[in-house]
Image (spheres, helix red, strand yellow):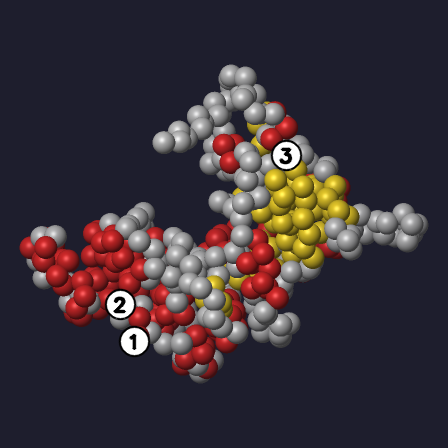
Amino acid sequence: MSSQPARLSLHWGTDDTVEDINRYVNGGFHPIRLGDVLRSDVANYRILHKLGRGSFATVWLAATMEDAQLSCSYHYRPKFVALKICVADADSQHELNIHSRLPPAQDRHVLQLLDDFSVHGPNGAHVVLVHDVLGSPADLTDLVQNQVRQLCKQLVQGVAFLHSHGITHGDIHAGNIGVCLPTLDGHSEDDILDYFGPPEISPILPRQPLPRPLDTLPPYLTPPIALAYYLKERNPSFVLSPLQIEIMDLGNATIVDEHPRPSCTPATVCAPEIMFERVTTKTDPPATFASDIWSLACTLYEIAFQARIFHFASPSNTLLVDMAKLCGGIPPEWVVYFDTSGLPKALDGTISRSAADKEWKRKVDHYARKWTEKDDIDGFVDFLRMMLKLDPGARPSAIEVLNHSWFVNR
């Protein structure tokens, strides 16, 4: 039996704003220093700051560098881009294949790759995906509230675009939705970095000597910056312009004609048919177009109401019951499990269509103060409930969602 490697203990601990230092091992993250230059066949990119991190990648703000052999103009202004540096053992070719199937389109609202290349380091070979810099909707709540219908439509258009090309996203949630920052390149590197000030770095000093080379680790960790805050404060044209959103992270997407992959949808937005299998069989069935629609509805709810539809969700009987209560029924395939789990007595008749109607009315009354009559919160709730069906076969397609009256009759 192989033993798990001991977790790295540091003299100065870090919080959850940075990535797990224990992922800097063979097959894991690539160590980065601010100022590093990464080179592809078409451009050189200088790392300026961190934009984010996830389980399978770190994301960095970078500026393209002037090629002295091609240009000596003092008017040169870099383009700012995001570099997604994948862990070495990620199936990055799969994500590249997904991107290659997606043509340019006017209303695609799915992130487009600008460049891709590989970088070799002490932890292996890492694919680097280059794309436009995006902001988080969570950093723009005041602007989002005034553009809810427009942003919801764009998100549905993005899902419809993926589905029309035979692609299930499988990981739709607010963290994978980005807001375009089209005016960013009009700002200087100095202005941006001065606004955020010196990075809050946490030096990496292990308590014990390492059994592996020290160069597998970065010299420090640093939390990400939120460029949306900078633009809101320094750029009036950005604040006044309509927002545009794009769906990010196709690493967990699947193509309809390829071998299915286990789902990895977060519990807060996970479709009930997948969650039921997680709870009862400890397996993860593949995501589907129908499970994307459930996740889409949960994400639209969060964008519109700035709250999650299922709070503190985790695979459990509690979450299954919450789903049943929200939808007003129990699927036939759940009945036997509910009976053997002793749940009917605990539920005491709380799952019914009328109880679900009351719960939705409570939600409407709570959030209505932020909505005008023109916004039509009742129409929006009807729109959500159309998608939030326990039976995946009863959920509409993304195109049918796009044709809902909440979009069309406006």
Alpha-carbon span between mark 2 and mark 1 = 8 Å
* Residue 335, quarter of picture: bottom left
| Apparent side of residue 341 relative to residue 403 in the rendered image (left or right) | left
Dot 2 crowding, Cα within 10 Å, few <14, some 14–19, many 20+:
many
156 and 210: which is toward the camera: 210
Which amino acid, mark 2? Leu
Q: Quadrant of the N terminus?
A: top left
Circles 2, 1 touching at the beta carbon (< 8 Å): yes
| Apparent side of residue 45 relative to residue 261 in the rendered image (left or right) | right
Alpha-carbon span between mark 1 and mark 3 = 50 Å
Which amino acid, mark 1? Ala
Q: Earlier in the sequence, mark 2 or mark 3?
A: 3
Q: Earlier in the sequence, mark 1 or mark 3?
A: 3
* Residue 241, quarter of picture: bottom right
Residue tagged 2: 390
Q: Residue 308: x and y, percent?
A: 36, 55
Local SS, label 2? loop
For the image shown, how many numbered marks are present on the structure?
A: 3
Q: Is residue 110 above or below residue 249?
A: below
Which amino acid, mark 3? Pro
Which residue is drawn at the image coordinates 44% and 81% (left, top)?
A: 403
Residue tagged 3: 122
Dot 1 crowding, Cα within 10 Å, few <14, some 14–19, many 20+:
few
- Nearer the observer: mark 1 or 3; the answer is 3
Local SS, label 3? loop
Whether residue 205 can be seen here: yes
Residue tagged 1: 394
